[in-house]
Image: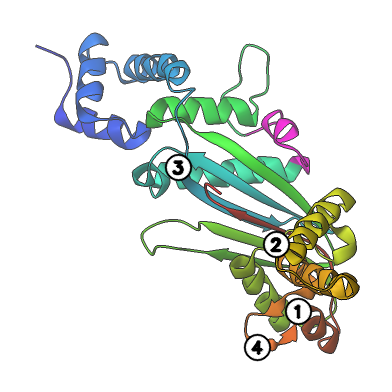
């Protein structure tokens, strides 16, 4: 008869978040030794990580923090199912990852994964974000990955995290870096970004090759529509303007009042946007 109780099973499950059957089997193999059972469960999970490498991660959460030094950090941590995404262990992992990535002021996923993190040391010394994610993925039984990282710079920041479902953690995250004193308008613009999904701040930020590609498309459309040759330049510029209103934040119609541009709203509020980032889980 195995030397453990139901209370031992409960304790181990709460500690690791493992399934009932796996937990009981580990305790049986460890003859009731909790620490040995923890080791067995982690080894089993670690072996499973390799098998999960090719699985898709369409769920997860976004998280952000103002670093207090003119920078803010936004991350997307992904997993396989919404069941794991809304669990305390995954949310706790995201908090640890965000803290480590922010402390390192990492600007790329590669730098973020190499950042020192709170966790058990490895054979090579200090644990990294990659180590912590791998260990927790083994316990959770799903593929977990740090998909995106962004370091936003500015004088002030408005952080907006949006839940698309009340049962899930934030799925859309925006960090707006700005100068000025109107925090309420800054938050409203951050909310606008979460909805309108601009790719660039100004039309000048749109890469030249993207503009030329769009120009060629709208010119071909205009010619196919039989527009007069003499009118083509004006028509093309007008349609390019519509394109900029889709992709450039300052050109967009303001979500709360489409008679105003975001640029106009910011100007009236005395705000200047220095940078922004938007992540949506799985997008």
Q: Mark 4 or mark 1, which has the lower sequence index? A: 4
Crowd class of label 3 (few under 14; some 14 to 19; many from 20; radius 10 Å): many
Q: Residue reaching furthest left? A: 1
Q: Nearer the viewer, mark 1 or mark 2?
A: 1
Number of the front mark, 3 or 4: 4
Place of residue 131 in the rendered image (x, y in percent of width and height, measured from the top left)? 58, 25
Residue 12: x, y in percent? 30, 29
Q: Which residues are magenta?
A: 104-117
Q: Nearer the viewer, residue 262 or 242?
A: 242
**Residue 257 image label:** 4
Disc 4 to disc 1, how far (Cα)? 9 Å
Contact between labelled residues 1 and 4, with CB atoms less than 8 Å apart: no
> Residue at horizontal 54%, vertical 31%?
133
Tell me the residue that label 2 is attached to: 175
Query: What is the x, y in percent for residue 181?
Result: 82, 82
Q: Which mark is residue 90?
A: 3
The 10 Å Cα crowd at callout 4, few under 14, some 14 to 19, many 20 or more, is: few
Placement of 14 over or under 176, stated as above or below: above
How far apart are labels 1 and 3 at the CA level? 36 Å
Label 2 vs 3, first from the N-terminus: 3
Q: Are marks 1 and 2 in contact (CB under 8 Å)?
A: no
Image-quadrant location for residue 6? top left
Tell me whether the residue at label 4 lies in contact with that at label 2, contact meaning CB atoms closer than 8 angstroms. Answer: no
| Residue carrying label 1 | 262
């Amino acid at each position: 008869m195995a030397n453990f109780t139901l209370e031992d099973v409960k304790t181990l499950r709460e500690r690791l978040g493992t399934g009932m059957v796996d937990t009981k089997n580990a305790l049986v193999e460890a003859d009731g030794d909790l620490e040995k059972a923890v080791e067995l469960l982690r080894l089993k999970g670690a072996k499973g990580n390799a098998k999960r490498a090719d699985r898709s991660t369409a769920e997860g959460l976004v998280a952000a923090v103002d670093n207090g030094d003119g920078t803010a950090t936004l991350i997307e941590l992904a997993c396989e199912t919404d069941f794991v995404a809304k669990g305390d262990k995954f949310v706790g992992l995201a908090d640890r990852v965000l803290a480590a990535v922010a402390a390192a002021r990492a600007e790329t996923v590669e730098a973020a994964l190499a950042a020192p993190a709170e966790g058990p040391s490895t054979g090579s010394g200090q644990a990294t974000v990659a180590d912590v994610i791998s260990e927790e993925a083994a316990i959770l039984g799903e593929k977990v990955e740090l998909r995106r990282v962004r370091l936003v710079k500015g004088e002030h920041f408005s952080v907006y995290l949006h839940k698309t479902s009340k049962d899930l953690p934030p799925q859309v995250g925006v960090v707006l870096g700005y100068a000025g004193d109107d925090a309420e308008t800054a938050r409203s613009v951050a909310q606008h970004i979460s909805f309108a999904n601009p790719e660039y701040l100004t039309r000048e930020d749109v890469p030249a090759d993207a503009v030329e590609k769009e120009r060629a498309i709208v010119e071909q459309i205009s010619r196919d529509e039989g527009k007069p040759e003499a009118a083509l330049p004006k028509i093309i510029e007008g349609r390019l303007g519509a394109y900029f209103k889709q992709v450039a934040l300052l050109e967009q119609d303001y979500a709360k009042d489409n008679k105003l541009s975001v640029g106009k709203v910011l100007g009236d509020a005395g705000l200047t946007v220095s940078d922004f980032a938007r992540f949506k889980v799985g997008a």
